[in-house]
Image: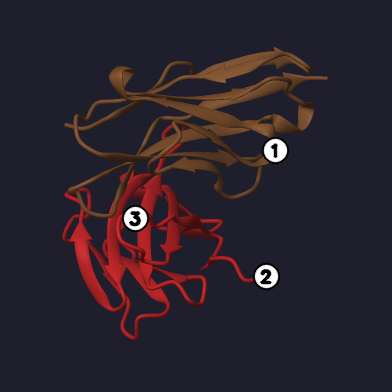
Chain colours: A brown, B red
Amino acid sequence: AQSVSQHNHHVILSEAASLELGCNYSYGGTVNLFWYVQYPGQHLQLLLKYFSGDPLVKGIKGFEAEFIKSKFSFNLRKPSVQWSDTAEYFCAVRLDNYGQNFVFGPGTRLSVLP
Amino acid sequence: DTGVSQNPRHKITKRGQNVTFRCDPISEHNRLYWYRQTLGQGPEFLTYFQNEAQLEKSRLLSDRFSAERPKGSFSTLEIQRTEQGDSAMYLCASSLASGSTDTQYFGPGTRLTVL
């Protein structure tokens, strides 16, 4: 079955540290890729998305992600995190030819220490 | 606020009771999705509508679950004879169909607790 994995369950960083959250999917066809963020007590919000074209996509709040097709990966990065980035981050994949539903990863909780 | 809204935000019920949740999508969006999220997991797809037609249903959606979108606007998700395993956050999302590149926007969710 198609699946999405996120490498880390919980990441703890100090402010100004660099961030990279891993996301891998198991599907050989065309995919659309997304990162969503859920701040404490808030709903899921879209950070960035990839459909086609430049595999390096930029999102809101200084986040970016790189699609590496050969590695089935879509890792999220930020050069310098802030305390306000503390949240849960979800990678999601829409599988072409599998309808409209998304397959979400289990999430990575990011804690940024001030 | 013109985002996706869901009501109620919290629901506590006793096992065996029926519950119904409502989702109001972003007004111009023609696709509407239901997901379930349990603690420590990402959302799991349940079903989706394009306008009033229910086009996909996950095998997670047992016979006790039914969803409707009668006029292609708001949607309801009903769970009959609730079980403790139904306790979860139920999320609604909507999107504007644009080939294969639509983006889903999520509501705040309805947290269900079955005692």
- Is B36 on the left or on the right of B1, as rendered? left
| Image quarter of the N terminus of chain B | bottom right
Q: Nearer the viewer, residue A68 or B71?
A: A68
Residue B47, image quadrant: bottom left
Select label 3 or label 1 by which is in front: 1
- Separation of marks 3 and 1 at Cα, in angstroms: 43 Å
Packing grade of label 3 (10 A; few <14, some 14-19, many >=20) is some
Image x and y of residue A113, in percent: 77, 18
Image x and y of residue B114, in percent: 41, 52
Packing grade of label 1 (10 A; few <14, some 14-19, many >=20) is few
Q: Which residue is mark 3?
A: B15
Query: Helix, strand, or loop for circle 2?
Result: loop
Chain letter of the residue carrying label 3: B
Instruction: Determine if marks 1 and 2 fall on one subunit.
Output: no
Question: Mark 2 or mark 3: which comes first in sequence?
Answer: 2
Chain letter of the residue carrying label 1: A
Report the disc number at residue B72: none
Query: Helix, strand, or loop for circle 3?
Result: loop
Q: Nearer the viewer, residue A38 or B36?
A: A38
- Is B37 on the left or on the right of B108, as rendered? left
Residue in the picture at 44% in, 59% down:
B93
Residue projecting furthest to the front:
A53
Chain letter of the residue carrying label 2: B
Packing grade of label 2 (10 A; few <14, some 14-19, many >=20) is few
Say which amino acid is labelled 2: Asp
Up the image or down, B112 lies above or below A84; here it is: below
Q: Which residue is mark 2?
A: B1
Q: Which residue is mark 1?
A: A61
Residue projecting furthest to the bottom:
B71
Up the image or down, A25 lies above or below B16; here it is: above
